[in-house]
Amino acid sequence: MNGRTIYLLAALAGGAILPVQVALNTLLRRYVGQPMQVTFISYLAGTLASLIICLLARYPLPALTSLSQTSWWMWIGGCLGTLYVWSTIFATPKIGAALALALTIAGQMIAALFLDHYGALGLTKYAASPTRIVGVVFVILGVSLVAGSKAVIE
């Protein structure tokens, strides 16, 4: 296993977990009600899990001097995550998990291509080469195939 493999596997595992998260959140919505309420519960559980992991790993608290050097906009990642979780809880019951996640992945790929190309938000620049653009087009074509099959199994 080379040094990059662990990162590839971590990204793959993170992607494999997303449909399970979407399904669990959608199921929880049946009992709780509104998508934003489920989003809150999901983030509360995630916050508690993160806290427990940090405590068990004995990670120190970040220094206030380090935190004070950040910009306000660096803190909105959690807000964007809230929008993502809410959108999947909102959309999945009406369009299905496969299409909801296919559209999520297409949106991620399009945005990531721009972020990489421009090195936006502190990312390393990776050119939007023709090969990478074709890869994103294939993702969009895949989404179209998933969207085109609307059969519901009862």
Image: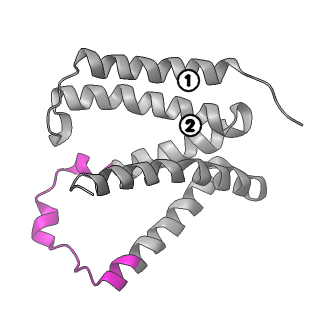
In magenta stretch: residue 64: yes
Q: Which residue is mark 1?
A: 143
Q: Which corner quadrant holds the C terminus?
A: top right
Label 2: state its secondary structure: helix
User: Residue 29, image x and y in percent?
Assistant: 71, 53
Amino acid carrying mark 2 in the image: Leu
- Residue 69: quadrant of the picture: bottom left
Is 80 rendered above or below residue 150?
below
Is 122 rendered above or below residue 21?
above
Residue 128 left/right relative to 84: left
Amino acid carrying mark 1 in the image: Val
Label 1: state its secondary structure: helix
Q: Which residues are magenta?
A: 53-76
Q: Which corner quadrant holds the N terminus?
A: bottom left
Q: Residue at coordinates 20% horizontally, 26% vertically from top-left?
A: 117
Is 21 rendered above or below residue 130?
below
1 or 2: tag closer to the N-terminus:
2
Q: Which residue is mark 2?
A: 101
Circle 2 residues within 10 Å: few <14, some 14–19, many ≥20:
many
Q: Nearer the viewer, residue 44 or 119?
A: 119
Q: Residue at coordinates 22% horizontally, 19% vertically from top-left?
A: 129
Q: How is the image coloured?
A: one colour
